[in-house]
Image: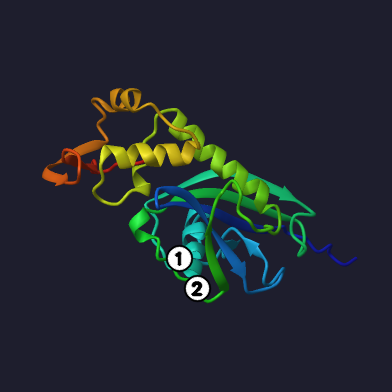
Amino acid sequence: MAEKKLLFPIVNTDVALFTLIDLKLRVLLIQRANKPDPGGWALPGGIIKPEIDKSLEDAALRMLATKTHVALPHLEQVATHSGPDRDPRGWSVSTLFFALLPSDQVPAVAGSKTEAIEWADPERPGRRLGFDHGLMLAKALQALRDKVERGALPLHLLPARFTLTELQRACEAILGRPIDKGAFRRQLKGARDLVKVQGAFVRGAQRPAQLYRAAAGFAF
């Protein structure tokens, strides 16, 4: 009797890569070059390669670097999607991550397996996303918002030096609502993640604004 062939699921990782453009939250979408759905739009991702990927995180970083040529300061697992119908190639499992890219590193370029890229509004991307990536994007955005609601500072979205106003605007862009300035500044008092850049200010029409940087070893 012939041995029954085992059917293994397709294992993917997908990444919602967030950044700030003009202090507005944006997510990276890619136009696919390969089957399935060539020409369609999706979150960057792909199938793991067990021979080179030591973990799902390694796979996500490899695929994002291949498709966008960017380095990430933060990557965080959000959820796992699975089922027989989410990918036309067969039963699949995909682990979703969100990642943060500093605003001054936005000039990402499409890689060899990508037709084009677009920085879209994560709430209204303006594209029909393939697979179940619309649901994935909604989950990633909520995970990011939940962390900021709990007081995490999204310093990985900012350039190396920034003002407290820029930090507040980043939090507001993520949450999708204004934040009271006084309450926000009180929240920051004694924050170990913020370090003053001594003697560094942004000068404008108002009084000079102190510049800050993230503390060494900061993790969102």
Disc 2 on helix, strand or loop?
Answer: loop
Quadrant holding the N terminus: bottom right
Mark 2 residue type: Gly
Task: State if disc 1 and disc 2 touch (CB < 8 Å).
Answer: yes
| Residue at figure coordinates x 39%, y 33% from the top left | 152
Tell me, yes or no, if residue 48 can be seen here.
Answer: no
**Residue 24 falls left or right of residue 37:** left
Residue 148, relative to residue 46: is it above or below?
Answer: above
Residue 14, relative to residue 89: is it above or below?
Answer: above
Q: Looking at this view, is 19 or 78 the one in front?
A: 19
Q: CA distance from mark 2 to mark 1?
A: 8 Å
Quadrant holding the C terminus: top left
Q: Looking at this view, is 183 or 146 the one in front?
A: 183
Which residue, given by chain and number where applicable, does mark 2 sit on? 111
Which residue, given by chain and number where applicable, does mark 1 sit on? 65
Residue 124's spot in the image, x, y percent?
61, 49
Q: Looking at this view, is 153 or 96 the one in front?
A: 153
| Residue at figure coordinates x 39%, y 42% from the top left | 170
**Residue 4 falls left or right of residue 179:** right
